[in-house]
Amino acid sequence: FHNTMADPSMINKCQANHAEMCAENTTILEQFLKCDQYENCMMCSGFYGRNYGLPICSTCHLFLFSVDLKEDGDEGDNRVYNEKVDSDDSGTEEPGVETDFYASSDIQDREVYHQARRPARHKADRLTERINALTIAREQDALPPGLIDSLPAEVLLIVFKNLDDISLWVAGNVCTRWRQILDCEVSQTQWKHFIQLRWPLFQPQYKIRCWRQVYSQLLLSSPCRYCLESMMLQNTPPIEENSWRHRRLKSELKTLKIDPPEGIQATPLDRHCCHWQASITGPQGSPYEGGLFLLYLQIPQSYPLKPPKVWFITKIFHPNISRHGDVGLDSIHHNWSLALTISKVLISIQSLLTDPYCNVCMEPAIGNLFKYDRNQFDRMARLCTWKFAMHDYVMALHIDHTGL
């Protein structure tokens, strides 16, 4: 052992490995601290077009993270389980009648009859069209020189009146002229209203003078703007209400309001309870302490037979949470149970912040950092928490990989 340590070649190799690891850690942190850090889509590497700084381009997001809350499979997937599951701490109400849980023979016969009468679906042409769209690279958009500066203010005002809040914010960052026009047309009260619609659980603890700046920080702290867009109420598709689903969600919402878990809040964003927003306070003693992390939940039509889809809409430095905001939690993917509720899912995610599972990671580089250099991991996670998850207590801070 002493001979090995005295070997200059081994010492140089260890120093080189340490320097390489430090450089990799610095690169990882710089990527998370930058607001528009992704040069290409992490899925297609720019094959389907520009990603505008987001981790996933619009084409990949449409195919991989559909906002359609109806079932992905055939109608047969909507049937309930054949066995009854009951738990004392499930937080659910028992079905009122047996038919809520077990389909009668007459209902099953009618299902078979309607399925037989249903015309066959011809998807071949549509599938071919989609395959062709995915196999042809998109050309980069090229604007004629001087087009932005040549547009009259009257035309711009008409265009701006038909934009949503995210599009208005993006337009304000195109050039100084557009920003000045929007500053005159969009008041601070309107930006405050936009924040209340997008982030209803955001409650600032200090007097805000510029609501547009707060809106900018919240938007830049979100890993995916497409998920923010689909979270809004107007994107809720028309679905057929299920009585069991309705009673279950009503009971869960009542429990969350009367006796919410410590550091957890959740509220539906539409009357069908399809879209929810939740907040998790960083656990004490963890590098996330003091941060307010917002999440977006999609409740499927077949809930509670199928789990909700959960994304973080606040950037977080964690091995089990991807740069897009996906949560690597087994209970909402493969081990879903009727005994689980929205409250229990949020508690599990909060526990995951304290005890990451690094054997299988959404972000392997961060998982390796957690296992082999815990102090550096804590420092990086704390920096990202200060930058992205503390807008309710502190003004926007300029943070780089060397500190504040």
Image (tube, rainbow, N blue to C red):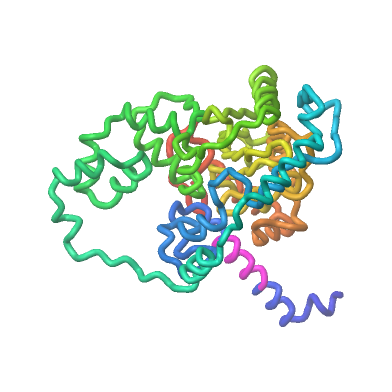
Q: How many marks?
A: 0
Residue 238 vs 52, above or below: the answer is above
User: In which image quadrant can residue 219 be found?
Assistant: top left
| Residue at x-position 68% and y-position 58% | 369
State the image coordinates of residue 271 (x, y, percent, origin top left).
54, 27
Residue 77 vs 27, above or below: the answer is above
For the stretch drawn in magenta, what is the main secondary structure?
helix
User: In which image quadrant can residue 195 be found?
Assistant: top left
State the image coordinates of residue 151 (x, y, percent, origin top left).
15, 52
Residue in the foreground of this view, choosing between 112 and 212:
112
Identify the residue at the far top of this view: 258
Magenta region includes residue 40: no
Residue 15 vs 154, above or below: the answer is below
User: In which image quadrant can residue 268 be found?
Assistant: top right
| Residue at x-position 73% and y-position 46% | 112
| Residue at x-position 66% and y-position 41% | 308
Q: Is residue 387 visible?
A: no
State the image coordinates of residue 385 (x, y, percent, origin top left).
56, 42
The quadrant of the image that shows the N terminus is: bottom right
Residues drawn in magenta: 17-27
| Residue at x-position 50% and y-position 58% | 56
Residue in the foreground of this view, choosing between 235 and 56:
235
Q: Is residue 85 visible?
A: yes
State the image coordinates of residue 377 (x, y, percent, origin top left).
65, 52
* Residue 168 relative to residue 238: left or right: left
* Residue 37 relative to residue 325: left or right: left
